[in-house]
Amino acid sequence: MNTDSASNATVSPASQWERPPRKPVLVDEANRMLAADYTSMEADLRPGRLAEILVKSPARALFEVINGRSAGVGLAALVIAAVCMAACGVVMGMLSGAHQLWAVPVKLVLGSLASLVICLPSLYIFVCLSGGTHSLAQVYRVATLAVALFSIILLGFAPVVWVFSQATSSAAFMGFLHFMFWGVAIGFGLRLLLAAFRYLNQCEMKTLRIWCVLYLLVQLQMCTTLRPLVGEYTGFGLQPKQFFLSHWTLAMAGR
């Protein structure tokens, strides 16, 4: 009798793997914010409406990407990014005027989309390595939300940029101003990306921070490849190869 009870109470080593332990629920501020608004948009998917939701309650757009009208939200996010980047390009081109008024917007739109495409495979791999279970299409659409938010915030700085572009002709100063605003805007975009994947997978996703650094470097090099974005128009073709740190050094020296 006692022997049978002891054998029933014994748990075989194999049975320990039948039910893996549940992941601990994250309770930080970003997850509480997303959890509170993680519901359907309950509205049309016009880019203007999506832009407002991304600023006010991005969790609702994230819900649509994962559980709802994912294709429509992804397309609307790309439209937002393209329109906002084009508008920022027009303001950026006002420093020199002439051909820069159309060349800079085209370069910014192409550069932003190219950076997303270049970094998408590595983003998917890093999400998988961090414990994520989403498909490549879902990872791509979450990334488009982050890029769209980044573009919206950057456009918000456009009036300030316009004021200074009318007050100075210094390409070095305007370049520094653009870089400062770009850093703030892309910081919010990457913050949304990290918070979204952490909430969806309920784990830290620490390796995604490595990808964020990679994405920043690609963006910086893309801006150098498509130069000049600030300054006189020198043609629409690609400029000679140059590392972005070398380009900054020469630009600050006025060469």
Image (cartoon, grey):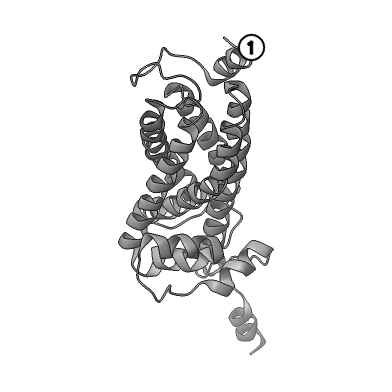
- Looking at the rendering, which quadrant does residue 164 occupy? top right
Q: Check the picture and name the quadrant holding the N terminus.
A: bottom right
- Whether residue 24 appears in this view of the structure is no
Q: For label 1, count other residues whose C-alpha is less than 10 Å away and answer few (under 14), some (14-19) or many (20+).
A: few
**163 on left or right of 116:** right
Looking at the picture, tell me which residue is in the foreground, 205 or 231. 231
Q: Which residue is located at x 49 percent, y 44 percent?
A: 126
In the depicted structure, whether residue 112 falls above or below residue 59: above
- Looking at the rendering, which quadrant does residue 145 occupy? bottom left
The x, y position of residue 104, in whole percent, is 41, 31
Q: Secondary structure at mark 1?
A: loop
Q: Which residue is located at x 55 percent, y 54 percent?
A: 192
In the depicted structure, whether residue 44 falls above or below residue 250: below
The x, y position of residue 52, in whole percent, is 48, 63
Q: Which residue is located at x 39 percent, y 25 percent?
A: 98
Give the residue type that dot 1 points to.
Ala
Looking at the picture, tell me which residue is in the foreground, 252 or 220. 252
Looking at the picture, tell me which residue is in the foreground, 36 or 149. 149
Q: Which residue is mark 1?
A: 253
Q: Check the picture and name the quadrant holding the C terminus.
A: top right
**10 on left or right of 241:** right
Label tally: 1
In the depicted structure, whether residue 10 falls above or below residue 148: below
- Whether residue 20 appears in this view of the structure is yes
In the depicted structure, whether residue 185 falls above or below residue 51: above
The x, y position of residue 251, in whole percent, is 58, 16
Looking at the picture, tell me which residue is in the foreground, 172 or 224. 172
